Amino acid sequence: MTEPVILVTCSGLSNTGKLTGQAGMVARQRCPGSVEACIPAHRLPASLSGRIVALDGCEDACALKKLRENRVEPDLHVVATECGVVKNGMAEPRFAEIERLAGAVIEAIRSGQQPGVHHPSGP
């Protein structure tokens, strides 16, 4: 069994920021043995252990920056806008966007690779 994952979300005010928290909770519900916690970046505890996944809404990378400020380098970094979600102000995330991002997070955790990263097959 692999080490449990802690998701650190940006949880900003934009639709993609709000989406990270919602998708993180869905991923946690669907993978209870794999995803141990879903923590907003602004509520990071003094220390983190285990596999860390930074879940950001956009290229501003708020969760990633907050982790690095605390001298933590995540094992994976998932960005909603790189998974096909459009940042459009302060709208509420749609169900399809939550599903898309939660699926990308779960796949990244299972594969150990950033979404969209494809390695060629060996010989």
Image: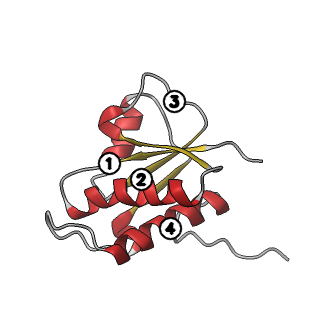
Whether residue 58 can be seen here: no
Give x and y (percent) for residue 89: 14, 66
Q: CA distance from mark 2 to mark 3?
A: 15 Å
Q: CA distance from mark 2 to mark 4?
A: 10 Å
Q: Amino acid at mark 1?
A: Cys
Q: Secondary structure at mark 3?
A: loop
Q: Is residue 14 visible?
A: yes
- Quarter of the picture containing the C terminus is bottom right
Which residue is the site of mark 2?
Answer: 55
The amino acid pointed to by label 4 is Ala
Compared with 121, 27 (above or below) is above
Distance CA(mark 3)–CA(mark 4):
23 Å
Q: Residues within 10 Å of mark 2 (few under 14, many from 20)?
A: many
> Element type at marker 1?
loop
Q: Earlier in the sequence, mark 3 or mark 4?
A: 3
Question: In 3D space, how far apart are the residues under numbered discs 2 and 1 (Cα atoms)?
Answer: 6 Å
Residue 107 lies in quadrant: bottom right
In terms of image quadrants, where is residue 68? top left
Q: Crowding near pointer 1: few (<14 within 10 Å), some, many (20+)?
A: many
Q: Position of residue 67 (x, y in %)?
A: 41, 36
Q: Is residue 55 above or below residue 39?
A: below
Lower position in the chain sequence, tag 1 or tag 3:
1
Tag 4: Cα neighbours inside 10 Å, few (<14), some, or many (≥20)? many
Q: Which residue is mark 1?
A: 10
The answer to whether the residues at label 1 and label 3 have Cβ atoms under 8 Å apart is: no
Residue that carries the numbered disc 4 in the rendered image: 104
Q: Which residue is mark 3?
A: 48
Query: Relative to residue 115, is residue 24 drawn left or right?
Result: left
On the image, the x and y values in percent for residue 32 come to 60, 51
| First-in-chain label (2 vs 1) | 1
Residue 95: percent from left, percent from top: 34, 74
Q: Residue at x 66, y 71 (%)?
A: 119
